Image (cartoon, helix red, strand yellow):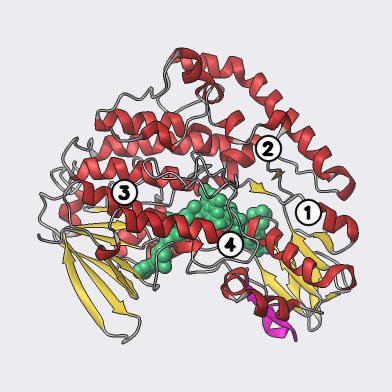
Amino acid sequence: METQVAIIGAGISGLAACKHCKSKGLNPIVFESEASVGGVWRKTIGITRLQTPKKIYQFSDFPWPPSVTDEFPPQSQVIQYLQSYAQHFDLLQHIRFGCQVVSLRYDGPSDEEMRAWSLWGGKGDPFDTKGKWHVTVQDQNTLSTKVYSVSFVILCFGKYNGLPDIPEFPKDKGPEVFQGKVMHSADYSAMDSTDAANLVRGKRVAVVGFRKSAVDIALECSTVNGPEHPCTVVYRTGHWGIPSVLPMGISIPFPYGTRFSELMVHKPDESFALSLLASILTPLSWGISKSIEIYISSYFRLGKFGTVPKHRLSKEIMSCHSVKLSEEFYDMVEKGSIKLKKSKAFCFSKKGILFDSEVESADVDLVILATGFKYFEKLKDIFVSSTFQSDITTAPGLYRNCIHPRVPQLAIIGFSESISNLHNAEMNCLWLSELLDGTFNLPSIKEMDDDIAKWDKYMKEYSGEYHYKRCIAGLQIWFNDQLCKDIGWFPKRKKGFMAELFEPYGPTDYVQS
Ligand SMILES: Cc1cc2nc3c(=O)[nH]c(=O)nc-3n(C[C@H](O)[C@H](O)[C@H](O)COP(=O)(O)OP(=O)(O)OC[C@H]3O[C@@H](n4cnc5c(N)ncnc54)[C@H](O)[C@@H]3O)c2cc1C
Ligand SMILES: NC(=O)c1ccc[n+]([C@@H]2O[C@H](COP(=O)([O-])OP(=O)(O)OC[C@H]3O[C@@H](n4cnc5c(N)ncnc54)[C@H](OP(=O)(O)O)[C@@H]3O)[C@@H](O)[C@H]2O)c1
C-alpha cells in the first residue's frame, strides 16, 4: 500500500496518531529520532510520576493493567504502559527509530495561489490536492539524509523536548562569567540517577523556576544534600501546588472536569442561555476556587513560607500550569533543605547568582535552569518555507487544536494542553483520522479563522498572559462535544441526567463503538 501519511514523533501523540490512521486503513510511516517509543516518558528524573490521575491519563481503548495500582504511577510504569500500547496495536512495524526529521518542504502551488484559497488545501480535502510534503530525514547512526514524499504530515514532535528556554542576560552578566556549572533541567533529567546524585552531592545548588521540573529537581537535590547544603529555588511567580487528594477524597478533575463545572465558564459559540448561566454561576466558580485555595494554603502552610500565589487557582488550572506538588516539598523547606528565593530577575556573578537589585551575590556551585522549552520556535524551525514559518508563529492557534488553516496537508498534535494531555491528544487523533477518512469536510478558511479567534478569546479570558499554552482544561468536554459532532458521534456520553451533569468525563467515555 502507498505510504501517504508521515507521522513525526513516537510519544503518546505519535502513537495515538499511528493507531488511529491504521484503523482507517492508512499505512503511516512514523519517524522517531530516538531509539524507542514514549517521548518525554522515556527518561525522566528518578522521582517523576504521572501528575494526572491514571484513569484520565489512559487511552480510551487500552486500560492500565490491574498490576498498576497507584493513582499516579511512576515513570517506569508509564513507559511500560506506552510500550504495551505500541505492541498491542502493532505500531512498532510502522516506526523508523533513530530517524530525525530535519525539515519539511511543501512542493505545490505558489504562495500567491495558496493565499487565494477559500478552502484548506484548495478543495478542503486533505488528499485531493496538487501538493506533496518532502520530509528530510536524518539517520542518527550514519548521519545520512533521505527525502520522503508524502501526501500528509502529522507533526507529533512534542512541546517539552528539543530547544530549552534559556533566559537572556545583559552582557557580562550571563553564565559566561560564572565559575560554577550551569545546566538546563533537560540535561539534568537525561542523566543517570547515580550520576545526578553525584553531581549535586555536597554542592550549593540553585534551581531556577517554580513549576514541575524545578520543584522535583529541588526535592531530589535536597534528599541528597539535606540542610547542610540547602538547595535554593529561585522563582519569580508563586504557584498553586496541588496535593494528590483534595478534601473529601476528590481529585482535581472533579471540580474542573464535569459538565456542571463547565456551566460556570463562558464558552466559544455559547448560546445566550449558556452565557447567562455562566455569568450567574461565576460567584460559585469563584467560591469553589477560593475554598480549594484556602485548603491548599493551609495544607502546604503557604502563608508561613510566603508563597501564597497572587492569582486564582482557577487561572492556574485553566492555563494548564498546575503542578501536583509532593507532600514532602514544604517539609524540606521547613527542615531547611530547600530555601525559597523570590526574585523578579536574576543574573550571574563570578561566584554565584545576583538577585534583583541586591548587591551581594548568593554563592552557588551549580545552577539548574528549570525554565521550560521554546516550543513555538521549534515548530517554526521545522518548516523550510518562510511563509509557513511566519503563519505558524504569528497565529499559533489551530482549528480544532490541530489544523492550521494556511498550512495544507498537515496536522499538529500535542501542542494544545489539558488536564490529561494524553486524552486531549487521543481525541485529536480520533478526529483527524475521521477527517483523513472523509467522514466530514473542514469548513472554509474564514470559518476556521473565526472559530480559532473565538477559542483565542476564551483562552485570553481564562488563562490571561498564559494563553499561548493553548490550554482547554476548563472546557475539555465542550471541546470534545465539537469533535464528536464533526465526526457524527452523539456528544452526551453518560447514562442519565445526574451522571451527565456531575460525573467527571474521561477517556473511557469515548470508546469507539
Ligand atoms: C517529565 C514530564 C512529565 C509529564 N507529566 C505529565 C502528566 O502527568 N500529565 C500530563 O497530562 N502531561 C504530562 N506531561 C506533558 C507531556 O508532554 C504529555 O503528557 C505527553 O507525554 C506529550 O507527548 P507527545 O507525544 O505530544 O510529545 P513527546 O512526548 O515530547 O514526544 C515527541 C516525540 O517526538 C520525537 N521527536 C522530536 N523531534 C523530532 C524530530 N525532528 N524528528 C523525529 N522525531 C522527533 C521525540 O524524540 C519524542 O519521542 C509531562 C511532560 C514531562 C516533560
Ligand atoms: N509529571 C511530572 O512529574 C512532570 C515533571 C516535569 C515536568 N512535567 C511537565 O513538563 C512540562 C514542562 O515543565 P517545566 O517545569 O520543565 O517547564 P515550565 O512549566 O515551562 O516552567 C518553567 C519555569 O521556569 C520559570 N522561568 C522561565 N523563564 C524564566 C526566567 N527568565 N527567569 C526566571 N524564571 C523563569 C517559569 O516562571 P513563571 O512561573 O514565572 O512563568 C516557570 O516557573 C509541564 O507540562 C510540566 O507539567 C511534568
Task: Compute the Cα span from label 1 to label 2.
Answer: 21 Å
Q: Earlier in the sequence, mark 4 or mark 2?
A: 2
Point 79% across, 33% down: residue: 294
**For the residues marked 4 and 2, what is the alpha-carbon distance in whole angstroms?**
21 Å
- Given residues 71 and 20, the one toward you in this image is 71
Nearer the camera: disc 4 or disc 3: 4
x and y percentages locating residue 4 in the rendered image: 16, 58
Q: Nearer the viewer, residue 346 or 125?
A: 125
- Which image quarter holds the N terminus? bottom left
Count of numbered circles on the image: 4
Q: Residue at x 34, y 42 (%)?
A: 399
The residue carrying mark 4 is: 372
- x, y percent for residue 344: 75, 58
Question: Quadrant of residue 478 in the image?
Answer: top left
Residue interval drawn in magenta: 173-184
Distance between mark 1 and mark 4 Cα atoms: 23 Å
Q: Secondary structure at mark 1?
A: loop
Q: Which residue is mark 1?
A: 328
Label 2: which residue?
313
In the rendered image, the quadrant that contains the C terminus is: top left
Which tag, 4 or 3, sits closer to the chain's start? 4
According to the picture, the residue beneath numbered tag 3 turns out to be: 404
| Amino acid residing under circle 2 | Leu
Q: Judge from the rendering whether residue 76 lies leftward or rightward of residue 19; answer left or right.
A: right
Distance Cα–Cα, label 1 vs label 3:
43 Å
Which amino acid type corresponds to the residue marked 4 in the rendered image?
Gly
Q: What type is the residue that disc 3 sits on?
A: His
